Every structure is written in structure tokens, then in C-alpha cells.
Amino acid sequence: MSKLDSVQKNDLLLKLFTLAFFMTMGIVVTFFPLYFDYKGYSKIQIGLLYAIGPLIGIATNLLWGFLSDRFQTVKKIMIILIIGQFVTAILVFTAGWFSLLYVCLAAFFFFQQPVNSLNDSQVMLHIRSSGKSYASFRAWGSIGFALSAGVFGIILRVYGTGLMPVLLFITISCTLIILFLLKDVRQGGKKMAFGGMVSIIRSKKFIWFLFLVIIMSVSHRFNDGFLALYMRQLGASDSLIGYAWMTSALSEIPVFFFLSKHGHRFKELPLLAFAGVIYAFRFVMMSFIQDPAWVIGVQLLHSLTFGVFLFTANRYMSQIIPDEYRSSGQAIFAVAWSSIAGLISGTLGGWIYNAAGGSTVYIIAACLSIAAAIGFLCTYLFQNEDGLPRRSS
């Protein structure tokens, strides 16, 4: 097989792997709560089960990202993680009492949480040699999530929620099979030096960027965490809530394909500022909605918010993190926008929601988005050689 054929084969396999993994993620995000409700657990117990995910993600993203860089392999680490998901999923669905289920689900998240950042890592490394765009691969994740939310939702409505574990085992198995066929993008790469990673973590440019990412991500996670509750408060049915999730996932796809073709024309920091402004507009609209059906239309703005944010932030990360630290850098980024932002939004958002209602949560989310947008724009306009806004003399 020629080098070109090998690259094209790996292109296809990476897209299929991203598709399959995001179908698994769609099940975890959309149908795990319904399954636990079906099994008779209370809403408080389900909330406790989901609170462990972001907390576990902080440690496990860093651990597996570090191991990937240390041993210069993504594929072998991912094989361990996918097999771990399969085994711990069996334990989750056979746990007989809540305390055991809590431990088993924590173990499942230990193996499930890092896969997203490691997949981003292998995509970033692959596109360096293939010349393709990150967005052209990530779009397949959106397709996978939308298929999972839509098609699996229909299947479960027809055959019952109890079928959900079977669907999860099918998607995990498909992910593992595709993974064995993938080429290891880290094989034979430059060895990681511990001192270099420390210098990157201590980089003011890197830390400032992550700080702004966390601010914007907290606003995004407010919507992720409280959308269903807010829609239910407005009188939405379960099917309408499902359509809202599917709409947001599908809306990413054209934006990812557009950015894969034309994204190089735009500077990263102004584009991130643009996403922040649209986030603010989106959340202000959400705060004034009275009819839950209108939420589906507002969810279309997910394309210009999260779609633009994720693509652009990853592209910026690829410029400031050397390849030998790629997995650790992506892991730190995932911890910032997913785990830390998830913990802050869950605790702060829950307190605000109970005290002042869902509309106030969205107004505060809009304020955070504007603050992040201003930060990104000022960094672009006034940054010094360290990538930080210059202080006025």
C-alpha cells in the first residue's frame, strides 16, 4: 500500500472511530439518566451519579494524557481505555445497590472521560502530516451524537429503556474494532521531556488562554446542565427535549465542514470573541423564552457558539503546544473546558437555579460569555510577545 493510500485509509478510520465514540457518548449523556430512572433511582441519586463524572475527569484526563506522551503512543492507551469501558459498563449494569453502582460508574468514567481528548490528540497529530482540517473529523462526532440521540431514542421508545445496555455494548465494540485497525500516530515520535512540559504548564500565554476558556465554558455548561430542567419547567415533553439536543448536535455539522474549508482565513482569537458574543445573544434569548418549542430554534445557534469555539480553540492549542506534549496539552484543555467548567457550572448553576430560577442562570451565562469575548478580543488587540494583554504604562 502506498503512503497516500495509507493516509486515506487512516483518514476514513479516524472518522469512523470518532463517529462510533460519539455514538457511545450520546448514549451516556442522553440515555443514562433515563435508564437509572427506569431502574428506580431517585432524582437526587441520579444527580449524585452524574456529579462524579467531571470530578473523575480532572484526574483521569491528566493521567492518561501524560502516559500517552510518556510512552509515545495513543493507540495502545486508547485500547486500554475502550476495553476498560466495556468491562466497567458490565459492572454498572449488574450492580445491585446504589453504593456499588456509584463506585462502578466512577470506574466507567475513569476510562470513558479521557477518550475525547486523546482522540483530539490523534486527529491533531494526523492532520499535521495529511494537511486535513480538524473540523472535517470532528463533524463526524456531531453526526454520531445526533444519530445516537435520534435513532437510539426511537429504538428505546419502541423496545423499552431496558435495551439501552445492549446499544452501549454495540457502540463500544464497534469503537474497539475500528481502533485495532487504526495506525498509531505517536509511534516513533519525539520522546517527552518532563522539563518541557513543566515550562508549557507555567506559560503565561497558555494559562491565560485556559482561564478565558473556562469562563466561556462555564456559560456553555450552564446550558448543558440545565437545558432539560429549564424546558421541563416551561412544560416541554421528553420528546421535545430530545429534539432540542439533536438539533444542537446536527447544527454543528455544516459549521465544522465550513471551517474545515475556510477556517484558515480567520484569526483564532477574534473568532473566539465572535463565538462569545453569539453565546451571549443565545443565552439572553433563552432567558426570555416562554414557549419551549422556541428552544429548538435557539439551539441552532449552537453551531455558531460551541461549533466555532471547539474548532478554533483546538486550532489555537495546536499552535502553542509542541507535538511531543500533544496528549498532555489536550488533556489539560479537556480538564479546563469540560471538568473544571462542569464542576463550577454544576455547583454554581444549581445554587442560582434554586435561588432565582432558570432565566437568571441564562442571564449570568450571557454575562460570562461577554466577559470571555472581551478577554479574547483584548488579548488579540493588545497582546505582548507572551500572548497576554499589555499593561498600560
Image (tube, helix red, strand yellow):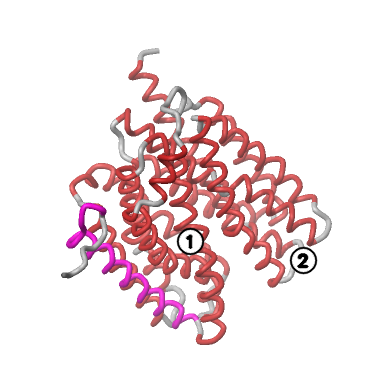
Q: Are marks 2 and 1 in contact (CB under 8 Å)?
A: no
Question: Magenta part mainly helix, strand or loop?
Answer: helix
Answer above or below: position of 203 versus 351. above
What residue span does the magenta drawing correspond to? 358-386
Which quarter of the figure has residue 161? bottom right
Q: Secondary structure at mark 2?
A: loop
Q: Position of residue 219 (x, y in %)?
A: 42, 69
Q: Position of residue 184 (x, y in %)?
A: 48, 27
Answer above or below: position of 125 versus 62. above
Determine crowd level at label 1: few under 14, some 14-19, many 20+ residues with C-alpha closer than 10 A. many
Q: Which residue is mark 2?
A: 40
- Looking at the rendered structure, the kind of residue marked 1 is Trp
Q: Secondary structure at mark 1?
A: helix
Q: Position of residue 20 (x, y in %)?
A: 53, 40
Which quarter of the figure has residue 273? bottom left
Q: Which residue is mark 1?
A: 245
Q: Position of residue 192 (x, y in %)?
A: 45, 33
- How many marks can you see? 2
Foreground of the two, 171 or 134: 134
Answer above or below: position of 293 versus 115. below
- Looking at the rendered structure, the kind of residue marked 2 is Gly
Magenta-drawn stretch contains 374: yes
Task: Name the residue located 58 percent from the left edge and 30 percent from the top edge.
Answer: 177
Left or right position of 86 against 282: right
Answer above or below: position of 326 versus 28. above
* Marks 2/1: CA–CA distance: 24 Å
Name which of mark 2 and mark 1 comes first in the sequence. Answer: 2
Q: Which mark is residue 93?
A: none
